[in-house]
Amino acid sequence: MTNPIFERLMPAPAGGGYCEKDHYIWCGSCVRGEDGRYHLFASRWSKELGFGSNWLFNCEVVRASSEVPEGPYKYEETVLSRRDRSFFDGMSQHNPYIQYWNGTYYLYYMGTTYGGPIPGPGDEVPGERQIEVWNNKRIGLAVASSIFGPWTRRDTPLLEPRLGHWDCTVTTNPAVTILPDGRTYMIYKSREYAGATLQLGIAAADSPEGPFRRLTDDPILGFSDPDLHVEDPFLWYSDGLFHLLIKDDSKNGSYGLTGEWGAGVYATSEDCIEWRIHPDPKAYSRTVIWEDGTRTEMCNLERPYLLIQNGQPTHLFAAAGTGEGPYQFEHTRSVVIPLSSDKAKKTGE
């Protein structure tokens, strides 16, 4: 039984997606706006700062647009940026995840704040400060009745950590699906302490704005093998099942779930709590096949996001970078890979 996402991947247009000469682009989630065009919400920060930890200290969320889902996308505006440090998301915003339901756009994201100086180009940030700011990460929400805004930003997080539990440090990396009746499910990431294994939890609400409640006290997708690890979820609901794309972030040289570090994993669930990894788990590879037949092995290909149209996934968006190795980038971009409408495997033919 072949993987239902992998078998539909098509070659990617080389000039598609979203990139900027002077900025690092990361994340990337797309929705069709009321204008009929496609709008991509992405994280960005200045390249002169370096990649490193600047997504924690100097990131903003922007909107770019295109006439077609493949792109190329052009910067339109900054949607989320700094505000007063006293807010949970006052100093940096990241991980945008856009959803639309019942006339409203819901932009979920991660925000953090910090004291002290703002790191600039060439500044080295001590490891202990990085951990402190990392531990301030919380999931936020901004809403608008138009893709062009204005966006109303909540002043409190959607979900707080729980002392004494596995998720007592942060709430971050929201992956949200809204059912037709408004019931909303959200997968989030956390860990028990600095350096502990990152794990995923599940919360739900009766409406997209919450309040959210945990569906289980334990993390989902718990693995007995400590070298098996996943992150960067994308969640959707169709045909009576919850579906999940996640990054295979295996540790210590493990072959992981797919045999390829950084590839995508596909899983399904009936209740969003108990998950079944697909027998052929690889949903995508870090190697991108372009329309001209060339291939590029990306240092990273992560933060998967599927554009869902008429109830079916049509395009895979992912944060990608080329360079010397994982997170050692010369440049980054949001890549768009179309999916075939049938179930004939298209790549590599």
Image (cartoon, rainbow, N blue to C red):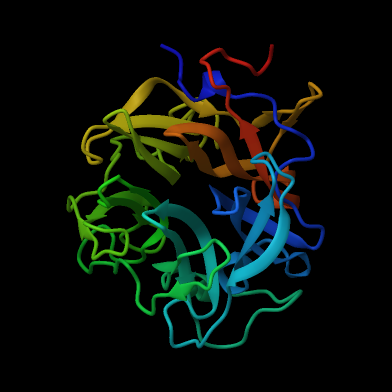
Q: Measured from the top left, where is residue 172 in percent x and y?
A: 41, 60
Q: Give the mark count.
A: 0
Residue 138 seen in render: no
Q: Measured from the top left, where is residue 83 in percent x and y?
A: 53, 84
Image vertical order of residue 153 relative to residue 62, above or below: below
Image vertical order of residue 304 relative to residue 92, above or below: above
Which residue extends farthest front?
A: 35
* Quadrant showing the N terminus: top left
User: At 64% from the left edge and 41% from the top edge, which residue is drawn?
Assistant: 69
User: At 45% from the left edge and 75% from the top edge, which residue is drawn?
Assistant: 152
Residue 220 is left or right of residue 29, and the answer is left
Q: Measured from the top left, where is residue 188 in percent x and y?
A: 35, 54
User: At 68% from the left edge and 30% from the top edge, which residue is drawn?
Assistant: 288
* Quadrant showing the C terminus: top right
Image vertical order of residue 147 relative to residue 160, above or below: above
User: At 49% from the left edge and 25% from the top edge, which residue is drawn?
Assistant: 5
Q: Measured from the top left, where is residue 65 in percent x and y?
A: 67, 54
Residue 281 seen in render: yes
Depth check, front residue: 222 or 152: 152
Depth check, front residue: 163 or 93: 93
